[in-house]
Amino acid sequence: MEGFIEDLKLGIYQTFILDNNYQYFVRGIGVTLLVTAFALLIGLALGVLVGIIRSAHDQQPEKKKGIVLRVLNGICKVYLTVIRGTPTLVQLLIMWFVIWASARSTDENMIRCAILSFGINSGAYVAEIIRSGIMSIDRGQMEAGRSLGLNYTATMRHVIIPQAFKNVLPALGNELITLLKETSVVTVIGLKDLTKGAMLIQSKTYQAFVPYIAIAVIYLALVLVLSWILGKVERRLRQSDLR
Amino acid sequence: MIYVKGLKKTFGDMQVLSGVDMHIRPGEKVVIVGPSGSGKSTFLRCLNLLEQPTDGSIVFDGQEITAPGVDVNLIRRRMGMVFQHFNLFANLTVKKNIMLAPVQLKLKTKEEAEAEAMRLLKLVNLEEKADSYPAQLSGGQKQRIAIVRSLAMNPEVMLFDEPTSALDPEMVGEVLELMKRLADDGMTMVVVTHEMGFAREVGTRVVFMDEGVIKEENEPKEFFDHPKDPRLQDFLSKVL
């Protein structure tokens, strides 16, 4: 027991204090959050766009589907199939080593690549979440909007999307949490995120226990904070359901 | 005001409307009755093109609205529609439900629309609900607000699709009462309903639809007292 405590003390010292190693965690958290936040923005933008195109296509009667909508829907379907059918890790490797092959290995380049890769990946999942949200809204809502003379887009924007968004918020929150944790695979392209920080400390100090437990706790803490924020937003949006 | 000629509608293999002709004059209150599945709701929904007719034509105020290239949205502004399930926008307060279309379509400024919304709410004694959400209202309140939401567009015709069918019995009265007031103000109305009392009292013409066609139409007294069509006689014996 005493030996364990001594080891732990040494581990903590080497992991955090020696050579200012704690900096690896601080910078790592920064990179992880940066990649997550911007990937989320891209994912949301892409996902809302694709989700709307997909549901517009599915809700339109067969005869009224224009050629543009059909083509867009086809493109979206290919995108969803490819992205959801291949591992995130493989997508990242292709993005960095194939598509960005000529880019220099600077931190900025790697961060940009990671953001784009995760954004595109997340967009596919967000799209399906958004689509399920739109499809869940009673079609009477659309009919009421149209019967007043509002066009499809205006009704979508002011009536359907706000309700759909509220309904899918828990699922979107789940996607955000998944995204945050999944960014840990950026270590394979050498980007120094939180996970890479722990790996670097391990290779310097031969300590494994403290660094890995530490980042596990940090990831958990980040997720808890996110969940808390999401819970607040959800309660706010639920206002219109209160009786 | 509205001329309907040879209106047909099929859903897949199912023929719901098999040639309906009707002429609705300004100020008329046409009440459409009939057994479920007779096509009366579909007919009403064709009038403002929520359903696209398969065949036939509808002329509204001299304009053929079934012709290709017609701006449906402009037509719909002039035709109010009230639904069986109210369809109030669940994400908006009562006031904003009423204001949304006039403001978005730039027919009124926000201030004008708000003043109009409050005036309309006062008309139905619901001004204290202006900032409530639809989920906080009773069915009767929802339907009355749905009606004034349509009125906010100053429509020339109001279409009612079984407006009281989803209401608890004790709330039917308040909605019918509002519809009567609307009728007394001279609004042109087309009403699909099972309320025979309303048909008799408010209707200027009652139409019996069955199997996708109009089987009989007449002024209310004659319609109810001396029905000629055997299907109508049978129908009336069941509902009266």
Image (cartoon, rainbow, N blue to C red):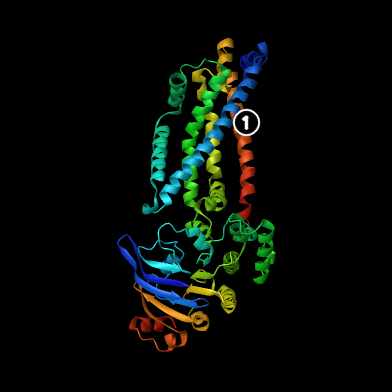
Vertical comparison of B129 with A10: above or below: below
**Res A204 quadrant in image:** top right
Where is residue A166 shown, x and y percent of the image?
A: 57, 48
- For disc 1, the neighbor class at 10 Å (few under 14, some 14 to 19, many from 20) is few
* Residue farthest along the left direction in this orientation: B13
**Image position of B31 (left or right of B213):** right
Q: Chain of mark 1?
A: A
Where is residue A216 shown, x and y percent of the image?
A: 58, 26
Vertical comparison of B130 with B217: above or below: above
**Res A2 quadrant in image:** top right
Please state which amino acid type lies under the numbered disc 1.
Ala
**Image position of B114 (left or right of B84):** right
**Image position of A117 (left or right of B213):** right
- Residue found at x 56% / y 35%: A41
Query: Judging from the image, what secondary structure is the residue with disc 1 in?
Result: helix
Q: How many marks?
A: 1
Vertical comparison of B66 with A1: above or below: below
Residue carrying label 1: A221
Q: Closer to the camera, B228 or B22?
A: B22
Vertical comparison of A77 with A167: above or below: above
Where is residue B138 shown, x and y percent of the image?
A: 60, 66
* Residue farthest along the front direction in this orientation: B62
In the picture, the quarter occupied by the C terminus of chain A is bottom right
Q: Closer to the camera, B149 or B68?
A: B68
- Residue found at x 52% / y 72%: B164
**Image position of A23 (left or right of A185):** right
Where is residue B67 shown, x and y percent of the image?
A: 40, 61
In the picture, the quarter occupied by the N terminus of chain A is top right
